[in-house]
Structures are given as structure tokens and as C-alpha cells.
Amino acid sequence: MARKKRVHNRKMFRKKPWVVIVALVCALGMVLSGIAMGLQGIFGPQGGLGGDFEDWDLSDWKNYADHLEETIEIEGEDPENLSSLAWAYRMISQEAVGEEGDKRQCYLEKALDTQKSIIEMEPEDTRHRTALVQSYLEAARVVGEEGDERQRYLEGALDTQQSIIEMEPEKATHHAALAETYLEAANLEGEENQGDYFENASDAYQEAVELDRENVAHYHGLARVLRQMADWKAGLEGEEHEQERGEYLEQALVTLEEARELEPENTENYSEMGNTYLELAGWKEDLVNLVDEEDAGEEEIREEKKKAAEEYREKALDMFKEPLEMEPDDPEHYIAMYDSLVRMERGEEAEEWLDDAEAIIEENLEDPDDVQEEARNRYYKAQIYMNYRQDVDMASEQLEKIEMEEITDQQLLQKIRQMLMNIHFMEQMQEQMQEPEDMKDMKDNGKKIKDPLDLDTKETENGKEEVIDIEDIDDEENDEISDNNGDSEE
């Protein structure tokens, strides 16, 4: 179906294009990463690593994988060592962001083969299958636009998750994981298949809610799927799609109302409802542009929709303020207010909330209740530096002060690790964008450089190596051939 133009406030993204990169990385990285982090104690590095592996780089992980391969060759295949080896392969692929995709894919294929061997050894342990799902999805991300390969990996992830459900059909979390897998597939696939994936994700979360009606996380997941379906519909032409977009958002709001009834003190209910109200406001504003100028009472219809949009925005602010009353010392809620006001194009008012967030963080860090409280506030301080103050170095400095091994809050640990991955990714991207010193020297000396991949070295008369351009060699050889041909003709 044809895409239609959507009008949004893109000023911030035009000024800060790196924000888009961070958002995309987060969107890909966070999907199912909570499950993966939960499995780390089982499938992560074993034997003497402790928490030090957080600082490991590509060479460390390669050395560790080599060590495990040698151990397995001597001692034989053991599920624990194989699990650690599979994890090491995945970490090598993650660390090798700057390398070619086929190299990263090679290590992920090794991880897949290793995990399949573990499943053959312990077929009843669903945790091994969950780890296999993670590797399939990681591989699907790495191959990117290669449709057939990506489809193979996505089908592998979905089939494996379905096999887990067949083993334990009454476990709601397995259905929720299937929904997240469908969402990942929708994000990776093109628009043509997105609708089916979204529908399947919605069905899976509905099943999770039916199996465990007391778990608000499933309600939040279902509402998130419905909002993504609405966003997808917003990009399709036709009034029927706009109508369905509104219906999805209203269903999401009803779902979140049910979650609030279950846990009225859960602040996430209010932030999710606030975001949904903002999206409803955007929907109403888009409907204003669809009003036919020839319709009777056209101006009245427009004003009515504009008024409805403003009412939704006010309801959104009310929702974002609720957590502030429950937890006035939590900077997360102030940051949420800032984000919502920016989306409403109320920049000056938004800055006040961000200033308040920073002040509260500093106050909390003066005398934190415990290690968890200090870690949370340092994480939010890093988030402000990274996302709003454009200071990645300061964000990294805050994260380095966190005692990772002392954190028991798995959600917080997941967020910190994700931010560390984002910073690492951005640093690698920055390194790739910087011009290598040897290329600068060559330019200073008048050398012609066409492609960094064409660089080679040769030994000079004084024994030192000089960087040269392979194309220059080709040109010189061609000149010699031409000269020789000329001599023979003479």
C-alpha cells in the first residue's frame, strides 16, 4: 500500500541526528534482552569471570572462546561449557560492530550450532531453547536487508519459541515471549508482512493475559502492541486505516485501565496511559487534515477534533503527574514529564522539569539509601547527559561509578547494560568516521587515496614500510606494459 506523508515536529532530530541512531539501537537492542539477561547466569561466561566480563573487548572474548574450545576438545562436550561457548560467540558478534556483517554472522552461526547441540543433550530444558531464540534474532538483525537469510533466522526464532509453548502451554510468560518475537520480526521485516506479525503478537499477548490475569506486565505488553499497530496504520493511506488506528489506541487505553485497576500504585500504568493519550491527540490532529472542505459544517468539525486533541493532551499531562505524587523523589517521572512536554512543543516548560530531575538526582546522590538507589540515580544522570545534554563522555563516567556486581534489580541492570552497549556502539561508529592517521599523512604527501580497502604496504630502501595505494601500483604496471608494447612496436 502507498505511504502517505506524515507531519511531525522533527526539529530536535534535525539538530541532533545522533538521537535517531540511539533510538534505533535501543529499539533493536531492548527487544527480548530482559529474557537474555535473565539467562546470563546459565548461558553466560563461567569460571572465574565474576563481573569483570563487563569490561571485556573483542580480543578478550575471542581468547575466551579459544580457551573454551580447547577445554571442550580435551574434556568432551559438557552443557555448561557449551553454553558459555555459545554466549562467547554471541558476544564476539556484538563486539565486532565495526566488522563486516558476514564475519559477525559466522560467529552467530557457531552460536546457533552450539546451542542446537545443547538442546540435543538436554531437550527438556526450555532455557536452552530460549537462548537459541536470542541467537536467531541476533542473526536476523546482523544480516539486515538480506531478505532470504533474515527470513530463515526469523522463522527459526518463531519455530523455537513455538516449541517452548508446546512443552509448557499453560505458562503465560512463554506466550508473552512469542509476542515479543513477533514484534521483533515486525520491526525487521518490511511493511508488507508487518500487519500479520502485529496481529500474531496481539493474539499471543491476549493468550498471556488470559492465562495470568494478575500480571500487569502482560497488559502493558498488549497495550504496546496495539499502539504499534496504530502507528503502522498511521502510515497507510485511506480513511479506514485512520479509523482502525483510533480503535487500536482506544483498545490500548482500555487495556491499561484494567492494569491500573489491578495495581493502582504501579507508576508504569500512568506513564503508559500518558503516552497513549498523546498518541490519541496526534490521531485527532491528523483527522483534522482529512476533513473535506466541501463537507457541511467543515469548520465546526475541524474545531471539534482540535478540541478533542487538546483534551487528550491535558489528560496525558494528568497521567504523567500521577507518579510524581506517589514518588516525588524519583527522577524518572520528571524526565517523563520533560519528554511529554517536548512532544507537545512546550520546550521552555519542559526544560524546567529536566532541571528539576537533575536537582533531585544530585540530592539523592548526596546520601543514597543503598547501592541500588545510587545506581538508579547515576543511571538517570547518565541518561540525561547522553540523550539531552549530548555529552556521551559524562554519561560513560557516571556508568563507570556504578557497582554492577552489587545490583539486584534486574530491570535496572538491563537498562544500564543497554546504555553501555549504546555508548560502545556510538564510540565505534565515531572511530570509523574519523580519518586514519596514515591516510592523513598520505594526503599531506600528495598521495591519492580512493578507498581505505585498497591500502597496502611495501618496504622502502631504508627498510621502513610505506603505505601505498594499490591502484597506483596498477597504474604503474599499466604504464610499464604500455611502454613495453611501444618498444616492441618500434
Image (spheres, rainbow, N blue to C red):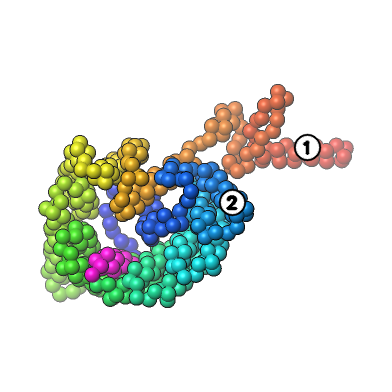
Using the rendered image of the protein, determine whether residue 286 is visible from the camera's viewpoint.
no
Residue 54 located left or right of residue 455 = left
Using the rendered image of the protein, determine whether residue 326 is visible from the camera's viewpoint.
yes
Question: Which residue is at the front of the view, 298 or 275?
Answer: 275
Give x and y (percent) for residue 473: 70, 38
Q: Which residue is mark 1?
A: 480
Residue that appears at 60% across and 57% down: 76
Element carrying mark 1: helix
Give x and y (percent) for residue 449: 59, 37
Question: Which residue is at the front of the view, 264 or 4?
Answer: 264
Question: Which residue is at the front of the view, 404 or 448?
Answer: 404
| Residue type at tag 1 | Glu
Magenta segment, principal secondary structure? Answer: helix
Local crowd size for mark 2, using a 10 Å CA cut-off: few (<14), some (14–19), many (≥20): some
The answer to whether 441 is drawn above or below residue 319 in the figure is: above
Among the 4 quarters of the image, the one containing residue 117: bottom right
Q: Which residue is mark 2?
A: 71
Q: Given this view, does label 2 or label 1 mark the residue nearer the observer?
A: 2
Distance in Å between CA atoms under marks 2 and 1: 55 Å
Give x and y (percent) for residue 100: 55, 51
| Residue type at tag 2 | Thr
The answer to whether 419 is drawn above or below residue 318 in the figure is: above
| Residue range (magenta) | 214-232
